Image (cartoon, rainbow, N blue to C red):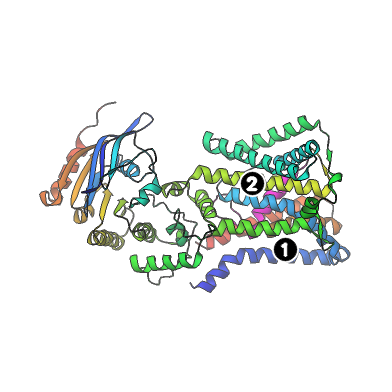
Amino acid sequence: MSVVQMENIHKSFGKVVALQGVNFKVGSNEVVGLIGDNGAGKSTLIKILSGVYPPSKGKIYIKGKKINLEGYSVREAHKLGIETVFQEQALGVKQTIWRNLFLGRELTNSLGLIRLDKVKRETDKMMKELLGFTGGGVLPESTVRTLSGGERQGIAIGRAMYFKADLVILDEPTRALSIKEVNKVLNFIRKLKERGKSCVYISHTIANVYFVSDRFVILDRGQVVGRYKRKEISESDLNEVLIQIHHVPKPAD
Amino acid sequence: MNFTKLNLGKYRMQLGLIAIFALILISFMVTSPRVFLRPTIYLAFLSTIPFVGIMGLGLTLVLISGEIDMSFPSVMAFSGYVCATVYSATGSIVLGALGGLASGAGIGALNGTLIRRVGIPSIVVTLGMMFLIRGCINVLSGGLGKSFTAIIGHPLHSAMVGKIGGFIPAQSLWFVALTVILWLILFRHKFGNYVLFVGDNEGAARMMGINVDRTKTMVFILMGVLAALAGLIDSFRMLKWWPTMGEGYMLTTFATVFVGGTSMFGGEGSILGTFIGAFLIGSLEAGIVAAGLSGFWTQVIYGLLILIAVTIHTLLRRGGE
């Protein structure tokens, strides 16, 4: 059974058509690489799946159950086990790590007051056990603006891991990261796979994404233009496919 | 970095403010010992500072949420007017006070709706609201004040502006209590967490499922209620309401918040800083006049204090990065 199935998804922003009739599926314990050039519609597709905004048209099934798109939201997606690490990282940089980790899912007592001790302890655990932050002066109390780009990405990923998602969506997670930090992200995706989870890895290049994905879906100008299993295609052939797509002249408006 | 260093660092701004306040008080004690070495002046501060301070607390939350409010001086006056009108119609000061608070909440909700649902910047909406409400007050009241002398002895009057133990103004305890409550809401309650994030990074808050419009509208409602409360306190204290009430409090309230270390950029600020800032700003004028300087000097010193404080806050923040 697929974890997620999106059927005939359309999305327009005013006159701009971002997606036109996309079908997209993620199987159980599968890592799908969602590839396409800048502006192909990758981020729009996953923002719809994450509940950030609704599609103009289309259907979404999560674990076989049809989603009522009227009431679908980020909170609803979280409840259904879908966590997203956005390209923008979705962090408040002036806030502490613990505030960022629990944003929208605060651990509170009956008065709605945050249980500070527990929150900080859990954040510390998340940082050490899931991300391997040991020493280096980074504490649950540290504000995000004191962290490096890689560390920030780590917090965003750690947040997705902490809440035990069935499907983790990563939007360009390795952009602007050093090689060492890229490896950490790739290891994280492998770890997810080992734990039986599913993952969507979004990228505009083949590098990195090829080695961790089971399957590739290529988007171009709001449409799916290719689907490949990794065992069927080599990295260089996949690269060639992308280059071919990008050389097709865009139709005149 | 360790926890001790971090905690000290966390409060260094507030500690610095207390030090500045202490320095200013000491200099006043030196220049005007007859005034500043007696308790009378401090009791007067406890009577006059709270209503600017209470509005400052609300404004702190508004600025942290990444917005601004210019309408609160008019809301303050409107609340007093509504209270006086309901009181003379029903004979109940409790209903009058509730009416005043509700009018503040209503204007706050209207501000929030125009800003978030229609999409007009908060500075424009609240500036328009400031003129509109003040204009309505003048039209409705015909420019005439209203008396509250009949409420002397009513429990509500004693509870809001009476003298605790015969000398401590009750409104100062309201100010302290509201400071504690708003600190808890902002830094310990999940609603405060939303306020911090919508001011810090609205997009991130939305992506994590926070209802940005509702959070900001709630902050404007809170600001409206606090301004309304300040209006009631001032009316009850003076035993009269007058149509120009609140005019002149706009800049001192902003000064209080900025000196207290709250940023215009949203996402960070200090409730405790505003509390101390209110006393700093509120005691300056009396001190300057008592020292024998002309009242004109007040503005020079306000200006200097604001610029110095904000420069220090900005440098401290940059140092923390």
Amino acid carrying label 1: it is Phe
- What's the chain of the residue with tag 2? B
| As drawn, B286 above or below B145 | below
Q: Determine whether, in the image, residue A227 is placed left or right of residue B224.
A: left
In the displayed image of the protein, which residue is found farthest to the right?
Answer: B34
Say left or right for A135 vs B78.
Answer: left
Query: Would you name the residue on which mark 1 appears?
Result: B21
Q: Earlier in the sequence, mark 2 or mark 1?
A: 1
Whole-percent x and y of residue B107? 64, 38
Chain letter for mark 1, please. B
Quick one: A69 or A134, which is closer to the camera? A69
Magenta residues span B244-273
* Mark 2 and mark 1: Cα distance apart in space: 26 Å
Residue B308 seen from this side: no
> Local crowd at mark 1 within 10 Å, few (<14), some, or many (≥20)?
some
As helix, strand or loop, the secondary structure at mark 1 comes to helix
Q: Which mark is residue B153?
A: none
The residue under label 2 is B223
Residue at image position (62%, 60%) is B312
Residue B281, quarter of picture? bottom right
Q: Which residue is at the far left?
A: A232
- The location of residue B108, given as percent across then percent down, is 62, 41
Mark 2 belongs to which amino acid? Answer: Met
- Residue at 44%, 68% (x, y): give it: A121
Can see residue B114?
A: yes
Q: Is residue A93 covered in magenta?
A: no
Contact check, label 2 and label 1, Cβ < 8 Å: no
Residue drawn at x 52%, y 36% is: B117
